[in-house]
Image: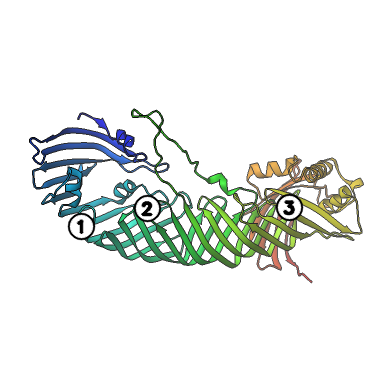
Amino acid sequence: MTRMPLAILDIGYPGLGLGGLASGTFSVATSGGNPPTGKADVTIRGLSRAGLVLSSRPIDVGVAALLSPDKLGLRAVIASGGKTIGRAQAQLAPLGEGDLATRIARARLFGQLRYSGPADTLWRLTGVELFDLSGPVAIGADVVGTLEAPVIRGVVRATNARIESGTTGTILSNVQASGRFGGSRLVIDRFAADAGKGGRVTGVGQFDFAARNGLGIDLRLQAANAVMINRDDIGATVTGPLTFTSDGIGGVIAGDVVMNKSRYRLGQATAASAVPQLNIREINLPEGGEEKAAPTRPWTLAIKARAPNQVMVSGLGLTSEWSANLQIAGEPQNPAITGRATLIRGDYEFAGREFELARGVIRFDGGVPANPALDIEANADSTGLNASIRVTGYALKPEIGFTSTPALPQDELLSRLLFGTSITNLSAPEALQLAAAVAALQDGGNGINPINAVRRAAGLDRLRILPADPQTGQGTSIAAGKYVTRRLYAEIVTDGQGYSATQVEFQVTRWLSLLSSISTLGRQSANVRISKDY
């Protein structure tokens, strides 16, 4: 063989995904019905295994083997970056009766493996892609028994390793683990890792190298304030037990946890971050027919999650905190959520104005992607007017409605709520903003809204058009603001004609805020605002 690509092995073993180039010699001889003899001297450059998401770090492997009528012996050296990181040797004797494959599989085995190098080099060769293991690992193992039923003895130690999942966004750092081989299993008797700021994960588990469908996994972890999901659309910091089990094809992540802190963004389908699945098969094979696809099964979730508070829900104009009781199933990259969340507090922003939420319920029905039903009401009282805003429908297409006492036409009601005055008294910029708000309502919340479009593009939390104020010398102005922290809000106001002001609000408690303002006209102020719900 001269630079033979290992990818051709996929013809006989679909989905194997090995890469690298093999060079060397291989010979087998037999005559007169006697057992075969042979030898091999092969070097593989850039041995790796590629999956849909991950590829193992290429390594170089040198193998020397000798087959005699009654035994098979081999030795291997593993190198990376010109440095030897592993050695292995094995002997199978005596070889029994039958064809060569049967004789080798049933012969008594004695083998040794010593490895000290990157964990990802070996881990990615397993083909498990739900999570990735990297960092230094040391392995010392002796193997006896047979290839069909190996008995392994030895130890594994990992120090300052890292486990990362691109599917869930989980990152476990400073992994400290030790394990021992027992039979065909690697038993992890000590595991500890950091999971986000102040979070911790500990546990035990085992990997079964003789599982029917490949690598069996049984991990039992205890999370303590650990960041276990960290994606753009959803995140969760949890405390409680979690298990990861697999028979070699797919697996189940189960748990019964309390969410210490979590976040969910409405209006963003969780399927957006899913990795596309490509179903490929080879047809017109030389012997005829089609390739039989390798058995596959996705990982699934079976998690109960409870949150007394600190479920932060954003999107669709909401900035809010909720409690929740949820059941999470489906696939990790596209979960199916069932249950409900109940409002604790929050605000709803519409057309540049912010209103305090009075009540709210979000119901998840297990749909994929998640599209929960909304029933949210915000107080929108104005001078001489009792009004409320209701957000109903579903997260991917919400419906917004207004009611008031006394009852008013929609455009007049919006004018009172947004600008505190009748529609007949609006300035031209205010009328434009009102027209955009009405258009958005008539189009189910999806109409053209230039104010919010600019706000989102600029990364601002608020963008408003303010009427002129003769007392301060301020013309019709634009106010742009952003939350520096959860409680500190800063806003800049300018009319483009020389007037500008900087306003800062710090929320001490839910009902007590400190406000300050400095303008170019030399006006400075400091205020205390107290609000109370009756």
Q: To which residue does mark 3 refer? A: 393
Going from N to C along the chain, the mark reached first, 2 or 1, is: 1
- Disc number at residue 141? 1
Q: Residues within 10 Å of mark 1 (few under 14, many from 20)?
A: some
Image position of 142 (left or right of 256): left
**Residue 430 % position (x, y):** 82, 44
Q: Is residue 475 visible?
A: no
Q: Is residue 451 visible?
A: yes
Viewer-proximal residue among 54 and 150: 150
Above or below, 297 relative to 288: below
For marks 3 and 1, give the CA distance: 60 Å
Image position of 69 (left or right of 458): left
**Residue 390 % position (x, y):** 78, 56
Quarter of the image where one finds residue 402: bottom right
Q: Residues within 10 Å of mark 3 (few under 14, many from 20)?
A: some
Q: To which residue does mark 2 refer? A: 248
Q: Are marks 2 and 1 in contact (CB under 8 Å)?
A: no
